[in-house]
Amino acid sequence: MLILLLALIFALLGIVLGVNVETVSSANIRTVMAHPTQRQAEGLILLDEEADLPGTEQLEKAVEAYARKQEQKRQRWLAAQEKRVAVQKEKRLQEERYAKALKEAKANTARTWNGTWSGAVLSKGSGTIIGPSGKETYYNLNMSRCVAVLRAMGYSEALYPYKVREDGCKTLGGYVMVAANLGIRPRGSLIMTSRGIGIVADTGGFARRNPTQLDLAVNW
């Protein structure tokens, strides 16, 4: 029954009023009724004469229901597009931030160390290696004090959340927390490590003996 009613609606709107049924809505129907052309006026008279026929009220309700569904569909599409654009924008920002961080880390490594790296990766089993910025070791201590110091320096929770990665590295903003010689690698600066980009968050006695050594914070 509804299919037949809609078919009749399309015929009436398309032939009598000259309305594009693919874009029909309550708004353009009201526009036609407010400012009809001569042809549309004749069509409205015809529709008015048919107004008392059985099923006319059902037709009007069907038109309104169809228009509502089309509007709901349009709103869902718009919401989906807005979400897609927001996701792409955030992805682009993350890529830009990473590219900037990588450039800074590589520059700091080149400035403070001129050795070579074989590609070895620090692990619990290896204990110590020569990484991309010099000797690497690891330690497992509570990092809350180091995090608090960096927070006071402006490294916010929003942009630099503290997290322990799946590989056991303790990170801030996605960067491996390391202890270093603060004289040549200031707190908060980025540096290359065998486990990715590192952020200087701590120091230790080793820094006096080996200024280019990095101690990576892990949970091993």
Image (tube, rainbow, N blue to C red):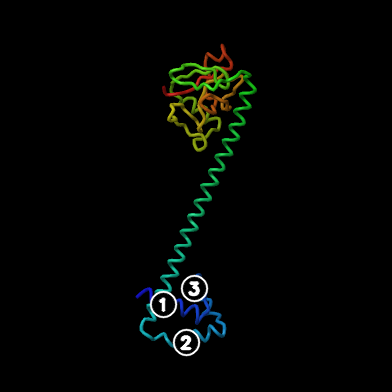
78 w.r.t. 5: above or below = above
Residue tagged 2: 46
Q: Are marks 2 and 3 in contact (CB under 8 Å)?
A: no
Give the spatial CA distance, label 1 vs label 3: 14 Å
Numbered disc in front, either 2 or 3:
3
Residue at mark 2 to residue at mark 1: CA–CA distance: 15 Å
What's the amino acid at mark 2?
Leu
Which structural element holds mark 1? helix
Outermost residue on the front side: it is 118
Which residue type carries mark 3?
Val
Q: Which mark is residue 60?
A: 1
Q: Earlier in the sequence, mark 1 or mark 3?
A: 3
Mark 2 or 3, nearer chain start: 3
Say which amino acid is labelled 1. Glu
Q: Which residue is mark 3?
A: 21
Residue 138 position in % (x across, y down): 47, 19
Where residue 190 sits in the image (x, y, percent)? 57, 27
Give whichever of discs 2 and 1 has the lower sequence position. Answer: 2
Give the Cα distance between marks 2 and 3: 19 Å
Note whether 81 is above or below 181 in the view shown.
below
Q: Residue 7 is drawn in which quadrant?
A: bottom left
Looking at the rendered structure, which numbered label has been put on residue 134?
none
Q: Are marks 2 and 1 in contact (CB under 8 Å)?
A: no
Residue that extends furthest to the top in the rendered view of this protein: 209
> Of circles 1 and 3, which is in front?
3
Q: In the shown orientation, is residue 160 left or right of residue 109? A: left
